[in-house]
Image: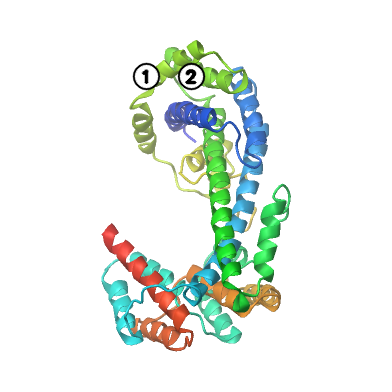
Amino acid sequence: METRFIKKQMTAAYQYSYTRLALNYYTLYETLTEEPELPGKGGAFLLTLNELIEAYLEGEEILNRLDQLREEVTREVEILTAYTDCFQIYEYVLNRLERSYKTLPETGYNDETFTDMLMAFITNTKESAVMNGRIRQIIGQLPVRLTKQKFYSLVLEGLSVYTGSPVDSLNDMMYTLKTESMASLPEGMAEGRRSLYETLKQFGHMDYRSLSPEAFSEAQAKLMGVSAELNEEAECFVSLQEIINDLYVLSLAKSDAVIDVSEEKLYHSIITGVLNGLTKNGDGEAEESFTALLTQLEGRQEAYYERYLRSEFPPETPELLADPDYVRAGNVDLLLSGSSFMDLKKVTAESGEEEDGTQELVDRAYLEKTAEAYFGQLETVFSGTSRPVMRAIMAKVLSDLPVYFHSIDEIKSYIRGSLESCGDEAEKETCKELLEELMDYEDKLV
């Protein structure tokens, strides 16, 4: 790649990430003054991160250790996401049982009127992406009364849009479907989270058709507690990963960045002050000193990011992927993309196909083979679960798929059929209530 482009991009990325690292690191410091312990494995990760920040400030090479830490945090987030997906299935079930235990207001809409309301909501936008998003949201809340074979045929229909697309696109969708349907869960879910794991097993073995009012209330309370626990830990890992990503950018960009000595000294002073506060219990006077320096960062983060966005990044080609400078620049771009847990690129051999085979395209045979393998995994899940949970899984899977309807009439027919085939009036009323809330929320956003 051109040296001029590399220096321009790396300088802007370096300045932006340095300011963001200083600010995020200080924010974490403030959080820990109020709550001294991070949840789960957050404390151990922070110790490692502090060591790496200190090593970087002293001029050491840390990229390999930093990459390992980033992968470890990403792994923990994958486990937390799997827990969240599982508990959302059981939340779906409990929501639809609530009216069997509590007296709640009725929506007052019959099936035909409500179908018309949903269709008006779907079609009152000209943007196809918005329309498809609304369709998927609605499918995720409608009652499910499908045979397994009908369900499998709908899944295959939804996956058919990947025919002719790169294999990686289909594989990404299959990963989502498998994790969110509990067909494939990451290893080590019980490690360090035995209580959470046991709670998950309890929900899996619960007889939802014969819950006493007390058992139902207890299950709801447990779900609320679990949700709070997962959110707290996830927020912790996101905060740590953002700091890790910025430190990663600094490590990648430092050799090409052109920065004023006084500016770098400012960032160094702030980060050193925070580090001392976190690891050596720095005195109040020292804290006041580095806190005062933060005012000098005002406006810099936004300005540097705007400058970074003005650097035009060349489109990816097999030849460029063989260029270490291009891959390094590409990873900087990924780290600043806003997706904290994005996989980073590796240098590949120069050829017409990437090493991971992403140029291979999906044909019908590959699609059907992939779908059949997934259906086999679902059969195992369905055989060990109750019908309400099976329906919740089906609803989640169908809402994850690309929209598989070919016309507005097909959508309307599916909605009407879902409502009319549900003989459980309490469940149907809850679905209508949730969908009404969805429509109200979307209207407020417009």
Of residue 114 and residue 149, the one placed in the foreground of this image is 114
Q: Is residue 376 left or right of residue 404?
A: right
Asked if residue 306 shows in the view, the reply is: yes
Of residue 325 and residue 376, the one placed in the foreground of this image is 376
Q: Mark number for residue 296?
A: 1
Circles 2 and 1 in contact, beta carbons < 8 Å: no
Q: Is residue 296 left or right of residue 45?
A: left
Query: Of callouts 2 and 1, which one flags the residue occurring earlier in the amino acid sequence?
Result: 2
Query: Which residue is located at x 33 percent, y 27 percent?
Result: 299
Instruction: Please state, as top left, top right, bottom left or bottom right, where the C terminus lies in the image.
Output: bottom left
Alpha-carbon neighbours of circle 2 within 10 Å: few (<14), some, or many (≥20)?
Answer: many
Q: Is residue 147 left or right of residue 14?
A: right
Q: Is residue 192 left or right of residue 225?
A: right
Report the amino acid beneath label 2.
Ile
Please tell me in which quadrant of the rendered image residue 103 appears.
bottom left
Q: Mark number for residue 270?
A: 2
Residue 102 at x, y = what percent? 46, 72
What SS does tag 2 mark?
A: helix
Residue 73 at x, y = what percent? 62, 42
Q: How many marks?
A: 2
Residue 290 at x, y = what percent? 46, 16
